[in-house]
Image (cartoon, grey):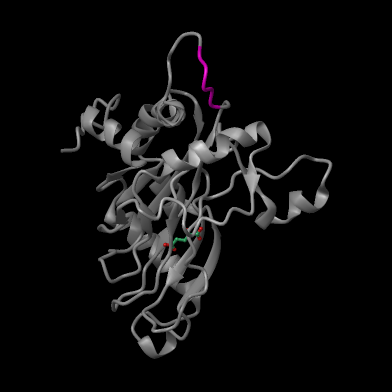
Amino acid sequence: MPAYDIGLTRVLSDAQVLQFIQDGFVRIDRAFSRETAGEGRAILWRDTGCDPNDPATWTRPVIRLGYYSQEPFRKAANTPVLHAAFDQLAGKGRWRPCMTVGSFPVRFPSPDDPGDAGWHVDVSFPGEAGDPHEQKDFSAWRVNVTSRGRALLMLFLFSHVGELDAPTRIRVGSHLDMARLLEPAGEAGLSHLALDTMAADRPEALATGEAGTVYLCHPFLIHAAQKHRGATPRFMAQPCLHPAEPFQLDREDGRYAPVEIAIRQALWEGRR
Ligand SMILES: O=C(O)CCC(=O)C(=O)O
């Protein structure tokens, strides 16, 4: 169904944009090439210190590596298909090119609990400058109803990820519940969110796909890691798409981006 019109003003069909607004994410197959994914994996394998051909060296359920901005990673994040999709979802010219894909939680097959598989949203800004502790302590960062500091959450698959290979779990449509939770907190937003039961009745989706697949997600989408029950380590990055200007929930010209439309719809439905 993808509307890959390589004139590259539109890569997502209307149905995909609607899916993004309603479900909070859209999957793009072949968003970057398998060769680029392979080049990235070679760098990552080296940094894990493990031997790709010897599972006996894979002794931990997760190794967190970062930050990555070498050529294959920048190339993956800046394909024409992705740039066009960013325009469609975050608004033309309203995002900044991604110069790093951030960190990788590399997940290995293991019966052990990785210890980092809680439901959460990715926070996007530190508290006010007056509190230097909050500036430095990432766990105290915040998220607010206009998604200050984050235009999209993105999942970049650098390896094939099947259902057993620790695909990220997604609560479908949970971005709408988050918008309603965040609204009363206004510009200051919220931190230290406990989201285990939030939107728990929503259906769950798994971020599976071939290497080169990218999931573009609404910044408020609730998601979680999980144990790896398969055979091949999983390489996935979760970079932030940074906004070039703040999102607005009240535009005079009515030119809302789908990220904003989803928030507006959630708040409007919450008031009915
Ligand atoms: O590894 C995953 O599947 C998700 C990890 C995650 O959500 C995080 O590190 O914030």
In the displayed structure image, the side of residue 121 where residue 16 appears, left or right:
left
Relative image position of residue 266 (x, y in whole percent): 42, 32
Q: Image check: 91 left or right of 19?
A: right
Q: Residue at x 43, y 72 (%)?
A: 45
Q: Name the outermost residue toward the bottom.
A: 56
Q: Position of residue 209 (x, y in %)?
A: 26, 57
Most frequent secondary structure within the magenta stretch:
loop
Vertical placement of 213 versus 87: above or below?
A: below
Camera sees residue 191:
yes
**Number of dots carrying numbers:** 0
Residue lying at the far top of the rendered structure = 253
Please give the name of the residue rendered at 63% of the width and 44% of the height, measured from the top-left corner.
190
Q: Is residue 143 magenta?
A: no
Instruction: Name the quarter where the C terminus is drawn.
Output: top left
Left or right: residue 3 versus residue 233 is left
Q: Quadrant of residue 159?
A: bottom left
User: What's the residue at 25%, 48% (across, down)?
Assistant: 30
At horizontal 31% and vertical 75% (from top left) the residue drawn is: 232
Give the residues drawn in magenta, as a range: 247-251
Q: Is residue 81 visible?
A: no
x, y (%) of residue 82? 35, 38
Q: Is residue 7 above or below residue 22?
A: above
Q: In terms of depth relative to the viewer, which is nearer, 121 or 62?
A: 121
Q: Is residue 220 above or below residue 119?
A: above
Query: Which image quadrant is residue 81 in?
Result: top left
Residue 104: x percent and y percent? 48, 62
Q: Quadrant of the N terminus?
A: top left
